[in-house]
Image: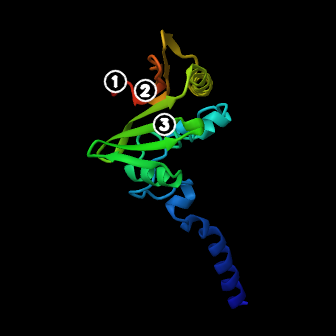
């Protein structure tokens, strides 16, 4: 009888104490911090879904992150891993930024620069090199719908559209077409940190 009571007591205590022994990462639903991992930011977790056309998927846009799955504040290692997985071409790297080239359809292309300080992304800038005015209009229309769904109504002045995002983020889209050169310039910054 004494052994049964001890066995039952051990089982009951084990059942009650086992959940309390889980590590903090399991109990909070967070993953341990890794120097190569991204720091989760609520801004990307709570943004409404935006329309993802084939054109935007070609640019590498997703429902997460600020641009191509990368969020301001992400580590430089996250950018390298993400862009390597997307088979982007590294074209420059120095102490302040890293740049990738991406080939698009119809001989169009995009350059993306990630500006960083102390290994964390502070500015994302993308230059789209396009073939003609209809292509500029199509990309501009899709990008405007995408960022408007995420950040709300933009401010428009001439060929420059700006959105104010959460956590003081600012998205800027500008038509930089001139003569026979067609293109768009996009930048994502914290307010006051622009290029």
Q: Is residue 116 left or right of residue 25?
A: left
Q: Residues within 10 Å of mark 2 (few under 14, many from 20)?
A: few
C-alpha gap between disc 2 and disc 3: 26 Å
Q: Secondary structure at mark 2?
A: helix
What number is the disc on residue 168? 2
Residue 46 image position (x, y, % from top left): 59, 36
Which residue: 42% across, 58% down? 34
Compared with 168, 106 (above or below) is: below
Q: Residues within 10 Å of mark 3 (few under 14, many from 20)?
A: some
Disc 1 target residue: 192
Q: Nearer the viewer, mark 2 or mark 3?
A: 3
Residue 17 image position (x, y, % from top left): 59, 69
Compared with 77, 117 (above or below) is: above
Q: Is residue 104 left or right of residue 39?
A: right
Q: Earlier in the sequence, mark 2 or mark 3?
A: 3
- Of residues 68 and 14, the one nearer the viewer is 68
C-alpha gap between disc 1 and disc 3: 25 Å
Disc 3 target residue: 110
Which residue: 51% across, 52% down? 87
- Of residues 45 and 75, the one nearer the viewer is 75
C-alpha gap between disc 2 and disc 1: 9 Å
Residue at the top extreme, as displayed: 158
Q: Quadrant of the N terminus?
A: bottom right
Q: Secondary structure at mark 3?
A: strand
Circles 2 and 1: CB atoms closer than 8 Å: yes
Q: Residues within 10 Å of mark 1 (few under 14, many from 20)?
A: few
Q: Quadrant of the C terminus?
A: top left
Residue 107 image position (x, y, % from top left): 55, 37
Residue at the front extreme, as displayed: 180
Report whether residue 62 is seen: no
Report whether residue 174 is seen: yes
């Amino acid at each position: 009888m004494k052994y049964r009571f001890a066995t039952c007591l051990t089982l009951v205590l084990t059942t009650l104490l086992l959940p309390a022994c889980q590590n903090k990462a399991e109990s909070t639903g967070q993953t341990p911090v890794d120097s190569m991992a991204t720091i989760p930011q609520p801004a990307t977790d709570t943004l409404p879904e935006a329309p993802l056309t084939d054109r935007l998927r070609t640019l590498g846009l997703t429902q997460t992150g600020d641009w191509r799955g990368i969020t301001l504040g992400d580590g430089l290692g996250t950018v390298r891993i993400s862009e390597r997985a997307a088979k982007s071409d590294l074209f420059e790297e120095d102490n302040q930024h890293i740049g990738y080239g991406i080939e698009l359809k119809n001989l169009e292309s995009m350059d993306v620069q990630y500006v960083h300080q102390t290994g964390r992304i502070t500015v994302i800038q993308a230059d789209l090199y396009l073939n003609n005015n209809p292509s500029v209009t199509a990309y501009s229309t899709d990008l405007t719908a995408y960022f408007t769904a995420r950040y709300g109504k933009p401010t428009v002045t001439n060929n420059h559209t700006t959105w104010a995002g959460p956590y003081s983020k600012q998205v800027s889209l500008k038509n930089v077409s001139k003569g026979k050169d067609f293109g768009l310039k996009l930048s994502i910054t914290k307010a006051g940190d622009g290029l």
